[in-house]
Image (cartoon, rainbow, N blue to C red):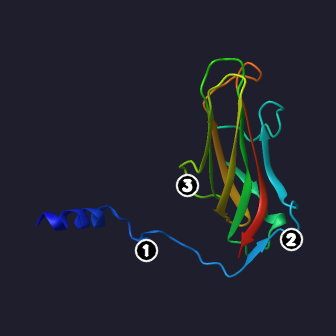
Amino acid sequence: MKKYFLPILYLAFTIPAWVYDYNEAGSVGFVAHSPGQHPVIIVNTASNLSPEITPGDWHTIDLSTDLPADTQAVFLSGILIITHGSTPEVCNMYISLREGGGQYGTDPTGQVVKQSIGDGARQNYFELVPVNDGKIDLLWSRSTEGEWPEHCSYGFNFKLVGYLR
């Protein structure tokens, strides 16, 4: 009886693949000449770049002018950035991406943390994101308030490097 306990326990907590909803794509498009990636999202709190993309709120990013009409997903590549200020604090940033107008995908898909005063953190980031009418949604959060150089500065930039259709 004991020898069957672990396999049965494993099966009880394994989620079968058919539970997830998948789309299939027939072709891939990608940049022809690196570094010819197209920047689509750039945020930097120290320089107040893209202040309309505020933390804590979902923002719809329209990529439709850069994509074929039947695009199902995009490849985004970039970097998550924290520059620590002079105040002792733990600086933490999360990123979540989902299809435009989506109801799912609130769990963070990217994170960067820094706690050393005067130091910085850079975290590479790459994600395949489903699109809806050429749009994706972005949510980001930060753990501290205040302005750099006293407090942490947060930033990220994503480039469109490919698509699936």
Q: Is residue 58 visible?
A: no
| Residue plotted at (72% across, 58% down) | 76
The image shows residue 118, relative to residue 156, as above or below, that is above
Residue designated by label 3: 105
Residue designated by label 2: 32
**SS label for mark 1:** helix
- Kindly identify the amino acid type of the residue bearing the numbered disc 3: Gly
Q: Label 1 to label 3, Cα distance in Å?
A: 18 Å
Q: State the image coordinates of residue 141 (x, y, percent, origin top left).
A: 63, 38
Which badge, 1 or 3, is on the more N-terminal residue? 1
The image shows residue 149, relative to residue 24, as above or below, that is above
Query: Would residue 79 be found to the left or right of residue 97 on screen?
Result: right
Q: State the image coordinates of residue 91 (x, y, percent, origin top left).
A: 63, 30
Query: Are there few (<14), some (14-19), or many (20+) residues within 10 Å of tag 2?
Result: few
**SS label for mark 3:** loop
Query: Are there few (<14), some (14-19), or many (20+) residues within 10 Å of tag 3?
Result: some
Q: Is residue 139 visible?
A: yes
